[in-house]
């Protein structure tokens, strides 16, 4: 067998492979695992590429193991048995369907984690993929949350929420500002922002300021780091509700201006154009419900086919 430099095969593919081998059908494996037929096929292909051999012979009615597949099935069953007998359960509980959600660390820490028990309920195990790159639905990802303007080709995207953005600071820094809350007064402090500075440019522009980052300003890759730095009094940031809500409601941050703008980009829930599995559909409904969408909007987004324009 030849494979990449990884020491282990992709672990998320093993249970899917074993299920398909046991049932002799990708469709049956998909139904039992609560994922789509396409996701099963992609995971098996990914495992075959890693191993460098064919594990299944595709037939008109189901699939059958190749000789290499039979040998690997025996090893996979041993590995899965060891994992399932382990004191620490590495595999999701079998009464729950796994749904893979790709999202940025900021959305995970500032919005999703507090809602995780409600989103999972008693029937879903949410596997979080924390990353910034474009989500690859061909790698088994079911849903994604990304920030941008949209729309994007080949996927369906729906803004999760509407952001009204305004400057915020730690109470100690706000006290130093006093009653001077205009653009020039704020610029006396370090400006904090993530990788996109357009928000600050748009907020400062009405007062005739053409903002360019300065040496005293600080850029962070993730918005959760912007919030952390702002709480510590490092500088002034722009609120991005609901990601900034908890810090403001707790009093760790306070508004330092009444002037707000519509933020120029939005966080979107993104799904492939192909049909979602039942569990992924249910998670999408819960995510959109938590974000405040109405039933009609949720039904249109989760429908198997796009609504006609």
Image (cartoon, rainbow, N blue to C red):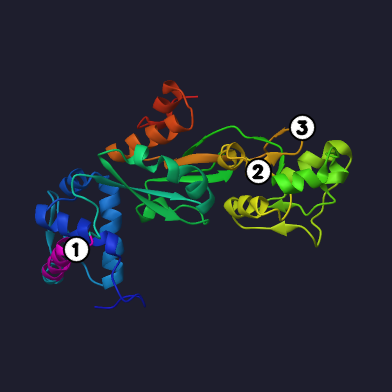
User: What is the chief secondary structure element of the magenta stretch?
Assistant: helix
Q: How far, Cα to Cα, is label 1 from label 3?
A: 55 Å
- Residue 301 locus on image (x, y percent): 43, 31
Question: Of the residues tagged 1 and 3, which is closer to the observer?
Answer: 1
Tell me if residue 206 comes above or below residue 175 in the rendering: above
The residue at the point 46 percent across, 52 percent down is: 135
Q: Which label belongs to residue 259?
A: 3
The residue at the point 17 percent across, 45 percent down is: 32
Report which residue position mark 2 lands on.
253
Q: Nearer the viewer, residue 126 or 64?
A: 126
Say if mark 1 contacts mark 3, CB within 8 Å. Answer: no
Q: Is residue 195 visible?
A: no
- Residue 40 locus on image (x, y percent): 25, 52
- Residue 236 locus on image (x, y percent): 73, 48
| Residue 275 location, quadrant | top left
Say if mark 2 contacts mark 3, CB within 8 Å. Answer: no
**Residue 86 inside the magenta-drawn segment:** yes
The residue at the point 10 percent across, 69 percent down is: 74
Label 1 or label 3, whichever comes before in sequence order: 1
Label 2 or label 3, whichever comes before in sequence order: 2
Tell me if residue 79 comes above or below residue 251 in the rendering: below
């Amino acid at each position: 067998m030849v494979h990449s430099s990884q020491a282990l095969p992709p672990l998320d593919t093993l249970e899917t492979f074993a299920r398909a081998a046991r049932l002799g059908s990708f469709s049956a494996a998909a139904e039992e695992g609560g994922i789509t037929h396409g996701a099963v096929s992609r995971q098996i292909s990914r495992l075959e590429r890693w191993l460098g051999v064919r594990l299944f012979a595709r037939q008109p009615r189901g699939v059958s193991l190749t000789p290499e597949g039979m040998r690997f099935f025996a090893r996979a069953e041993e590995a899965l048995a060891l994992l399932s007998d382990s004191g620490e359960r590495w595999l999701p509980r079998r009464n729950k369907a796994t749904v893979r959600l790709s999202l940025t660390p900021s959305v995970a820490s500032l919005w999703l984690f507090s809602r995780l028990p409600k989103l999972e309920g008693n029937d879903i195990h949410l596997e979080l993929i924390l990353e910034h790159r474009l989500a690859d639905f061909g790698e088994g990802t079911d849903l994604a949350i990304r920030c941008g303007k949209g729309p994007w080709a080949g996927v369906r995207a729906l803004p999760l929420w509407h952001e009204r953005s305004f400057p915020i600071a730690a109470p100690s820094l706000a006290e130093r500002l006093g009653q001077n809350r205009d653009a020039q007064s704020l610029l006396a402090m370090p400006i904090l922002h993530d990788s996109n500075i357009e928000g600050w440019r748009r907020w400062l522009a009405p007062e005739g300021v053409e903002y360019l980052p300065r040496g005293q300003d600080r850029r962070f890759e993730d918005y959760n780091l912007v919030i952390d730095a702002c709480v510590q009094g490092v500088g002034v940031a722009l609120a991005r509700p609901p990601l900034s809500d908890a810090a403001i409601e707790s009093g760790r941050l306070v508004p330092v201006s009444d002037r707000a703008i519509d933020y120029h980009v939005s966080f979107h829930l993104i799904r492939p154009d192909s049909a979602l599995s039942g569990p992924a559909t249910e998670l999408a409904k819960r995510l959109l419900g938590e974000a405040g969408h109405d039933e009609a909007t949720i039904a249109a987004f989760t429908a198997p086919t796009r609504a006609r324009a």
